[in-house]
Amino acid sequence: MTEVAVTGVGVVSALGHGKAAFWTGLVDGVSGLRPIRRFAVPAGAPILGGEVPPIAVTDVVRSAIGRRIDWVSLLALTACRLALDDAGLDPARLDPARTGLGLGSAWGNLQETAVFLDRLFARGAGNPLLFPNLVFNAPLSYASIELGITGATAMLAAQEASGEAAIAWGADVIGDGAADVCLAGGAEELSPVAHQVLRETQQMTSGVPRPLDPAAEGACPGEGAGVLVLEPLARARARGARVYARLVASPGGSVPAPVHGWPRAPEALAALLGPLVGDADLLVAAASGNPALDGVEAAALATALGGRRTPVTSIRGAIGDFGAAGALAAAAAALAIDAGLVPPTLGLVPPARAGLDVVVGAARRAPVRVAVVDGLARGGLCCPLRLEAA
Amino acid sequence: MTSTIAITGLGAVSAVGGDVPALSDALREGRCGIAPLTLFRYRGRSSVAAEVRATIAVPDALPVATVRRLSRPDRFAFAAASEACRDAGLDPALRRAAALTLGATTGGMFESEEVYRRRQAGEAQRFRLSRLLGTSLTTAASVVAQTLGIHGPQATVSTACSSSALAIALAADAIHRGRARVALAVGTDSLCRLTYAGFDALQALDPEPCRPFDAGRKGLSLGEGAGALVLEDAAHAHARGAKPRALLVGHAGGTDAHHVTAPHPDGAGAHAALRGALAAACLPADAIDYVNAHGSGTRQNDAVEVAVLRAVLGSRLARVPISSTKSQIGHTLGAAGALEAVVTVLALEGGVLPPTLGLREADPGFGQLDLVPTPGRRSPIGVAASSSYGFGGHNVTLILARGDGR
């Protein structure tokens, strides 16, 4: 297996555009959650959301796709460009057939789907200009066209772990020697449709989210995209690239769980995660403030750690919860290894669930040689990522 | 990366029946599953589709409330996956460690549309958007994993019409990498208004049952269903006495990076996929005895596909039998790669090549082709290619060979 290096980080989130805004915000304990502005939230409903500041299409799109590109695809493409730029790679100089692209999303383009169907039910005809944006792999198609990528490509869906799933896929592409460069990450939008779904199912907190806090009562919706540049470690070294971390692909798996919900018993999750977390210096949790997730995750991590006081953090308190948030968690893990700094979990008032050592308040300075993103998702999915200092 | 991959189990749900024997019979009889659309009301250029009419068993291991929320593709996937696991004789221990890959494009969209329709109609009392929560693309894999107890590595992929060909490729990769000895690959999709109206708006639907490669072809016919294949390290299959129904000897993908709906005019990505799959199989192009084409029936697709085949197979193309299974079971989108792989395995196994229905006069622009006419042809073959071209330019080719190695 070829060793896999993370050489670029591209992020757009409620903390802003780019790696610096993301990392500085996380480390300084800044919350990106604000009253939602892009659409009207009904009176009495939770108003906070993690919206990405507007992106000018012309800043990231140079080809004809700019006329039609949807918001999810634009988020993904922006993160791809930022990641390549961060890695010091010019898309025009990549070998197209030796470049891969993997993107994850839990829901895709829910909002324009609603627009398309409203017109269909009202007028009996579909809009041919809108339809291509509703195909689930639209972000993958747009980004491959815009960046001229003709190598291995895949769009993945894994509920809350959609970002991790795509990054794991990308690690395998590089690991197999099937590409010289692979962009991998995920994108998700915050839309009125998604907001209504969360309202109806009472998954949102009325205040700020409190990941891993026993008193948490729900998550806060967010959006964003995170993309990593992955390369063979030897190739990255040879070109003098900055290597944030090595990425070790983990097989992951699933555990018994309700089809539409969270696992209830932590033991099987702990067994899956145990071999990965034993020597970890940092665990980046999926915890969002959703009690069903946070409860089982905290118990599983505590069991897997077996009494070790390994620092834990979750970024969903700062940027909100969404299907591709795990891609940003992986970005945070890479940056934590690089900086020797663990960003705090916003919203948590200690003690944390299951007695975990969750970093709160100020960022904690500590060498991070191994960071694990646990990649938990509904339906019992577990798509963990393990990053190691290079 | 040197394991030989055996296919030891098959499952299928399609417009011609609820299992593999029904599909096999229909292929032999040249029966067409494309008929007037009844699943929903739609007034447009086309009004035919390949609907699943067979009764599909629901998983009895799930709570009633969960079963009520299952979408059509969830049910199709469960039925096809169950059949494939039974066929392969996978016991609970083998299933538990197996990898699971699934390709799909619209998840529970058909069920979601009813929610959107009620919203549009102002039936506020009876619509809850939260019904959408049961309709994510990932749910079908969760249903299969949780009901059949498959807890190895899991991935759901969506690259339009090549989704489940990619799922098969990823299942093989999981075995090659040593992550699993057994992997279940599934493709599933249901007809829905979104894709039906979308393809119709793009003028991609034939008003009549589709006629791939015909001079008068007018587009594709949408279908639905699920295909499932159990892939297994051949040594593992041999050791437990499981007979390979076929071998997956090579696979590769290729991306067009050209247009969100139209294929690359030269079929660049499809060409790379076919060449790459042959290279992975260590086989020359001459080794291909049969092509189970993507063959969607659109003017553009079929022209590009023939050009790609001619570029790779050269003058020998005139003598290589080709058929499009989409003429029988429609274009099942996310399920197409898996269902067509099942059909290709059946052709290798039985030595009977399925026909392309509806073919009256082959497009003269394609030159000399051996398009298998109705009702199919008895002809033993050793190696077959199955290609899937996806919307947005994501193409995958699988190279399959006879299970007995002949």
Image: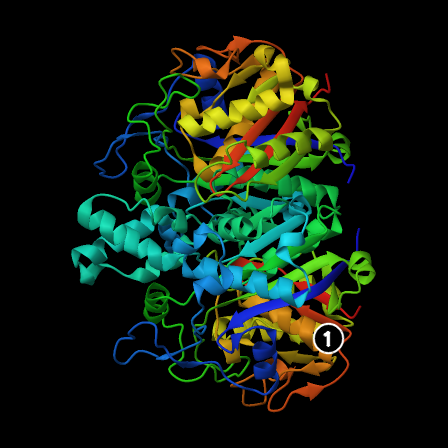
Say which of B303 and B154 sits in front. B303
Residue at figure coordinates x 29%, y 75% from the top left: A41
Say which of A198 and A185 sits in front. A185
Residue at figure coordinates x 67%, y 52% from the top left: A94
In this rendering, would B256 be left or right of A112? right
Can you give x and y, in whole percent of width and height, for residue A261 in the image? 47, 62
Disc 1 residue type (three-letter): Ile
How many labels, in total? 1
Q: Which residue is mark 1?
A: A337
| Element carrying mark 1 | helix
Choose top left, top right, bottom left or bottom right for residue B309.
top right
- Within-10-Å neighbours for mark 1: few <14, some 14–19, many 20+: many
In the orientation shown, which residue stands out farthest toward the left? Answer: B122
The relative height of residue B344 versus residue A166 in the rendered view (above or below) is: above
Tell me, yes or no, if residue B270 can be seen here: yes
The relative height of residue A137 versus residue A267 in the rendered view (above or below) is: above
> Which quarter of the image is occupied by the C terminus of chain A?
bottom right
Say which of A9 and A186 sits in front. A9
Can you give x and y, in whole percent of width and height, for residue B55 in the image? 37, 33
Residue at figure coordinates x 60%, y 75% from the top left: A298
In the orientation shown, which residue stands out farthest toward the top? Answer: B378
Can you give x and y, in whole percent of width and height, for residue B253 in the image? 62, 39
